[in-house]
Image (tube, rainbow, N blue to C red):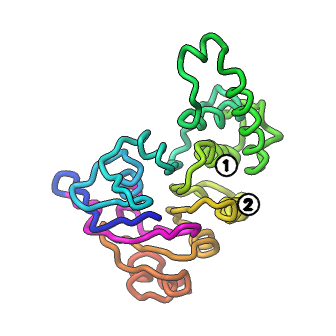
Amino acid sequence: MLTVNNLTMKFGGLTAVNNVSFTVHENSIFGLIGPNGAGKTTLFNIISGVLEPLSGRITFKEEEIQGLKPYQINMKGIARTYQKINLFNNMTVLENVMVGMHTKLKAGLLASITGMNFHEENEAYEQSLELLDFIGLSHAAENLAKNLSYGQQRLLEIGRALASEPALLLLDEPAAGMNTKEKNDLMDLVKKIKKSGVTILIIEHNMKVIMGIAECICVLNNGLKIAEGKPKEIQQNDDVIEAYLGGGYK
């Protein structure tokens, strides 16, 4: 589904991503790990159109997408979350999800002003409620986003990303700051999202989470890809242990 081929990105004299290649297959959960500064989020920013790479190609569904704007990439079927929660705090939980549907709505500005798009808005409302039920936040639909717990806000960000009906979902450290129960619930949700037909590319520092859900893992260190394989293979890889996991993990 997604192929990253020889991707390179530099900031001044710093090479943040150095000739990285990997393939994310359809209907899979693909993990991306590495120590701080390894280039993971830079890679996400390139895939999602926030940054344009110095060189290399990104192919999504057999179409090159490097250099496209974020909204163009979203319309092609890629959505993402961010390390830092970025919700509309003074809007309701339901409204936040509905905002995520904007690329799928056909009505323009005139229809919004005149009310001619009532049918479409009603359909979006119902779909948003269904999505909130899917992620476990239907009970908080009318709450302001800022009043949710930290873990719930993380879930809402995922829900908003899912609202655009992506084929590929990029999750940037979704378990950050979560307690044990929230992490377990997140793992269940990610598996549920995959089961619904959405492919997932996830950055995560929590080893229990990434080893528990990813089917294949790519490891970056100082911008370079140092390993790729199944979770058990990554756990036993000496280069990975030295660069990231630490000797006490196995």
Q: Please rate how many residues cluster around mark 2, counting C-alpha atoms within 10 Å: few if below 14, some from 14 to 19, many from 20.
A: some
Residue name at image x 65 percent, y 21 percent:
117
Q: Is residue 238 above or below residue 142?
A: below
SS at circle 1? helix
> What's the magenta region?
14-41
Q: Three-letter amino acid code at disc 2? A: Asp
Image disc number at residue 185: 2
Disc ID at residue 119: none
Q: Residues within 10 Å of mark 1 (few under 14, many from 20)?
A: many
How many circles with numbers are drawn on the protein?
2
Estimate the spatial distance between the alpha carbons at disc 1 and disc 2, rounded to whole Å: 10 Å
Q: Nearer the viewer, residue 214 or 152?
A: 214
Amino acid type shown at disc 1: Leu
Residue 193 horizontal/vertical position (percent): 67, 59
Instruction: Check whether the beta carbons of the residues at disc 1 and disc 2 lie within 8 A of each other.
Output: yes
Q: Which element is circle 2 on?
A: helix
Q: Is residue 142 left or right of residue 178?
A: right
- Quarter of the view holding residue 70: top left
User: Residue 124: x, y in percent?
Assistant: 69, 33
Task: Confirm whether the magenta stretch covers residue 218.
Answer: no
Q: Tell me, yes or no, whether the highlighted magenta stretch contains residue 24.
A: yes
- Mark positioned earlier in the residue sequence (1 or 2): 1
Q: Residue at x 39, y 66 (%)?
A: 3
For image coordinates 49% across by 51% down, the residue present is: 78
- Specify whether 19 is left or right of 234: left
Looking at the image, can residue 130 be seen?
A: yes
In the picture, measured across the screen, residue 55 lies left or right of residue 138, that is: left
Q: Quadrant of the C terminus?
A: bottom right
Residue 120 in the image: state x and y as whole percent: 68, 28
Residue at which label 1 appears: 155
Residue at 66% x, 33% y: name it.
146
